[in-house]
C-alpha cells in the first residue's frame, strides 16, 4: 500500500481553493476547524438552517449559508452529511449549483460506491476518510498529531485530483501520521465490515451477552458491567497502542491462556462463515439497500433497536458504576 506523509503533500493546493463544508456534525466540525488552522481561508459552511449545526458553525466563526449558497461560492465541496441523506441533498441542492471543474470530497465511500450519487464527469471526485471519530481527529490535530486518513480518486477531471486529495488530507493533520492511498470501494467495504463484524456489531453483542449470562447466573450487575463492558477499554487501548503481543505482555498468563481457549471456541467455523456472509452482503450492495429501505421508513428498525439498547439492564448498572467515576463523562465531551 502506498502511504504518504506531509513531505509528499503540497498544502498550498487546498489553501488556494474555496472550501464549502456541507454538514457540520461529527466530521464536518472537526474537518472545518482543522482546515482553518492549516491556513485554508474563506471556508463556508452549508446547513439546512434553523438547526443546531448551523448555530454551532456560526459560533465557531464560520459564515453559514444554505446548502445551495455554500456550493455556489466554493470550488471544493466537502459532503459530510449522514450517508443516508447525501443522495437526496446532492440531487436537490448540490448538483444544480456546482461550478464547472469543482471537486467533491467525501468522508466515506458509501454514496459513490453504491451509486447513490453519480456526479457529472467534469468534476473531481475525491475520498478523504479519516479513520476515527471527528472529536479524535480534532483532538489529535490540536496536540500536533494526526489521524490516519484513507484517500481515493473516483474521477480525475482536472488531472490533479490526487494532488488535491493529498493536500486536503494533510490539512486535516493526517500527513503527520499516514495518508493511505486506496479506493472508494476498498475504504467503503472494509469500513462497513469492521463496523458490523467487530466494532459496532460483534463487540457490543458479546458485551451484552456476557453481561446477561453473568447476571442470570446470580452475579452482581455492577460487577458484571465492570467485567464485560468497562474493562473493554483497557484491553482495546493496549491493542491500539502496541498490537496483540504488546497486549499479551500486559495481561496475566491466566487471562492470556484462558483467552486463547475461549476465543477458539467462540470464533469457530460457523462464526467465520457468518462473517463471510456479512462481507458478501456488503459487497453485493444488499446491506446498503437494507439501510436505505429503513431510512425510507423513517428508520423504524434503527430506532426500535436503539430504544432496546437504551432500555437494556446493562445501562442501569452502567449508570451506577459510571457515577463513581464522573471524569468519564468529561472525557466524552
Ligand atoms: N462519525 C464520524 O466521526 C465519522 C468518521 C469517519 C467518516 N464519517 C463519515 O462522515 C460523513 C458524515 O458523518 P457524521 O457522523 O459526521 O454525520 P452527522 O454528525 O450524523 O451529521 C452531520 C450533519 O448533517 C446534518 N443533517 C442531518 N440530517 C440531515 C438531513 N436530513 N438533511 C440535511 N442535513 C442533515 C446535521 O445537522 P443539523 O441536523 O443540525 O442540520 C449534522 O450536523 C459520513 O459520510 C460518515 O460516514 C464519519
Image (cartoon, grey):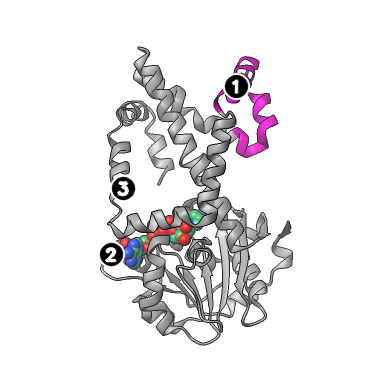
Q: Which residue is drawn at the image coordinates 28% and 44% (left, top)?
A: 304
Q: Quadrant of ligand 1?
A: bottom left
Query: Where is mark 2, residue-wise?
Result: 51
What x and y, as percent, mark residue 321? 36, 26
N-terminal of the two: label 1 or label 2? 2
Mark nearest the camera among 2 and 3 is 3
Disc sitting over residue 301 in the figure: 3
Res 186 quadrant in image? bottom right
Relative to residue 211, is residue 279 drawn left or right?
right
SS assignment for the magenta stretch, majority: helix
Rendering coords of residue 195 (x, y %): 50, 46
Magenta residues? Answer: 238-266
- In this view, the residue farthest toward the bottom is 100
* Left or right for 326, reference 124: left
Q: Which mark is residue 259?
A: 1
| Precedes in sequence: disc 3 or disc 1 | 1
- Residue at image position (60%, 21%) is 259
Q: Secondary structure at mark 2?
A: loop
Amino acid at each position: 500500500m502506498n502511504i504518504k506523509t506531509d513531505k509528499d503533500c503540497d498544502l498550498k493546493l487546498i489553501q488556494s481553493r474555496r472550501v464549502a463544508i456541507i454538514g457540520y456534525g461529527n466530521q464536518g466540525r472537526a474537518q472545518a476547524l482543522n482546515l482553518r488552522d492549516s491556513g485554508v481561508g474563506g471556508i463556508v459552511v452549508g446547513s439546512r438552517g434553523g438547526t443546531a449545526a448551523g448555530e454551532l458553525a456560526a459560533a465557531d466563526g464560520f459564515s453559514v449559508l444554505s446548502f445551495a449558497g455554500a456550493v455556489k461560492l466554493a470550488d471544493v465541496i466537502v459532503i459530510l452529511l449522514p450517508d443516508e441523506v447525501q443522495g437526496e441533498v446532492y440531487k436537490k441542492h448540490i448538483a444544480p449549483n456546482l461550478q464547472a471543474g469543482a471537486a467533491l470530497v467525501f468522508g466515506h465511500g458509501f454514496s459513490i460506491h453504491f451509486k447513490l450519487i453519480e456526479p457529472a464527469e467534469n468534476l473531481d471526485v475525491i475520498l478523504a476518510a479519516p479513520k476515527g471519530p471527528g472529536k479524535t481527529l480534532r483532538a489529535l490535530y490540536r496536540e500536533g498529531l494526526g489521524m490516519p486518513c484513507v484517500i481515493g480518486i473516483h474521477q480525475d477531471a482536472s488531472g490533479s485530483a490526487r494532488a488535491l486529495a493529498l493536500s486536503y488530507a494533510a490539512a486535516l493533520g493526517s500527513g503527520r501520521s499516514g495518508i493511505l492511498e486506496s479506493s472508494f470501494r476498498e475504504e467503503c467495504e472494509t469500513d462497513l465490515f469492521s463496523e458490523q463484524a467487530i466494532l459496532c456489531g460483534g463487540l457490543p453483542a458479546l458485551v451484552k451477552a456476557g453481561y446477561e449470562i453473568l447476571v442470570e447466573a446470580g452475579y452482581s450487575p455492577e460487577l458484571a458491567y465492570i467485567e464485560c463492558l468497562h474493562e473493554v477499554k483497557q484491553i482495546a487501548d493496549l491493542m491500539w497502542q502496541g498490537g496483540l503481543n504488546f497486549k499479551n505482555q500486559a495481561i496475566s498468563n491466566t487471562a492470556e491462556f484462558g483467552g486463547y481457549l475461549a476465543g477458539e471456541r467462540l470464533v469457530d467455523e460457523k462464526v467465520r462463515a457468518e462473517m463471510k456472509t456479512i462481507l458478501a452482503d456488503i459487497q453485493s450492495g444488499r446491506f446498503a439497500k437494507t439501510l436505505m429501505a429503513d431510512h425510507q421508513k423513517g428508520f423504524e428498525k434503527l430506532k426500535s433497536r436503539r430504544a432496546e439498547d437504551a432500555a437494556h439492564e446493562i445501562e442501569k448498572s452502567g449508570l451506577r458504576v459510571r457515577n463513581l467515576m464522573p471524569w468519564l463523562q468529561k472525557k466524552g465531551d
